[in-house]
Amino acid sequence: MSQLLRSYLFAPGDNEYLLGKVLSSGADAVVLDLEDAVHAQRKGEARRLIAEFLRQKPGSTIPVYVRINPVRTDLWRDDLAAVVSPSLHGIRLTKTESPEQIIALDRELSALEMRVGISVGATRIVPTIETAQGVLAALEIARQTRIEALCFGMTDFLADIHGESDSGFTASLYSLSHLVLASRAAGIQPPIASVHTQLEDPQGLLASCELYRRLGFFGRSCIHPKQIPVVHASFTPSSDEVKSAMAVVAAFEQQAVEQKGTAVIDDGAFLDEAVVRHARGVIALAANLVPQSEEITDEC
């Protein structure tokens, strides 16, 4: 399994200025867009600029993804032909609705990887689930080859089901939980949360990040660098959470030394295997998150 990432910052593929800034944004990963953020008449220019970006990518370890157009269009093959390279970590596939779409994408990727001389299978796939059909096919999609994680597209999903947005995710709650279960059952990373479209709403961003995290999501797509610190804070275990987890593990290990069947820690919490597994997960997560500076710029 690849490194867990907290933030994925989008940049339009046809904006040369933003492409020059995106790797210094402070995000754990970047997503260069060939789909909705690029006008139909600018697709070719966006492909050219992204291809040049990938050719000249500095020695940064920040993963680069490219969001391509849906497989049901006549654009996606040209998108792939332009961007598959050793500097590309993965593909975001929009409007994913069936495993057959992943199979077609995998076949095209394999041919391109052989053509450019990189290992077949090196390019990961992150399908974006944005429709009712996609949600219902999520488990089959998640079990396909190359899948790193599922991603949710809230705006398009609500439009598809004629639902309304609210702070409690009422219309999408079932679907969000379904993606978490499908991801776990398929053995891939937790799903990635949808963008928060209100740039001047840090409290709403924070509240929704916390809800996504409690549901079992990890990481979030971002549309501006100012969102990154909030997203990182939400998906990074706090020092108190890590200390509490370490106390749980220490008490459990002492219990084993003393050959006791049970243990209770100072706050009165009863320990069992499930509690300890969770605590170890918190410690491992804190230790393995990509180290990134929280000092970012608003220029991107």
Image (cartoon, rainbow, N blue to C red):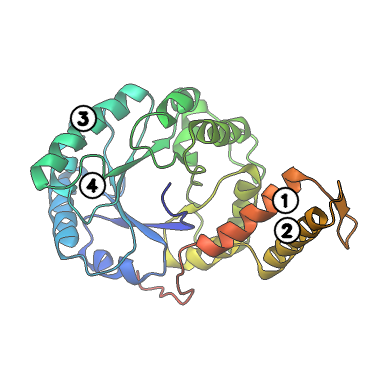
Nearer the observer: mark 3 or 4; the answer is: 3
Q: Amino acid at mark 2?
A: Val
For the image shown, how many numbered marks are present on the structure?
4
Q: Amino acid at mark 3?
A: Arg
Nearer the observer: mark 2 or 3; the answer is: 2
Q: Position of residue 21 (x, y in %)?
A: 29, 70
Q: Give the quarter of the figure containing the C terminus.
A: bottom left
Q: CA distance from mark 2 to mark 3?
A: 45 Å
Q: Amino acid at mark 4?
A: His
The residue beneath circle 4 is 39
- Disc assigned to residue 249: 2
Q: Position of residue 61 (x, y in %)?
A: 32, 65
Mark 3 surroundings: few (<14), some (14-19) or many (≥20) residues within 10 A: few
Looking at the picture, tell me which residue is in the foreground, 59 or 294. 59
In the image, is 274 to the left or to the right of 173? right
Residue contact between numbered discs 3 and 4, judged by CB atoms under 8 Å: no
- Disc assigned to residue 276: 1
Looking at the picture, tell me which residue is in the foreground, 110 or 73. 110
Question: Which residue is rendered at x = 54% and y = 60% of the image?
Answer: 231
Q: Secondary structure at mark 2?
A: helix
Q: Secondary structure at mark 1?
A: helix
Q: CA distance from mark 1 to mark 2?
A: 6 Å
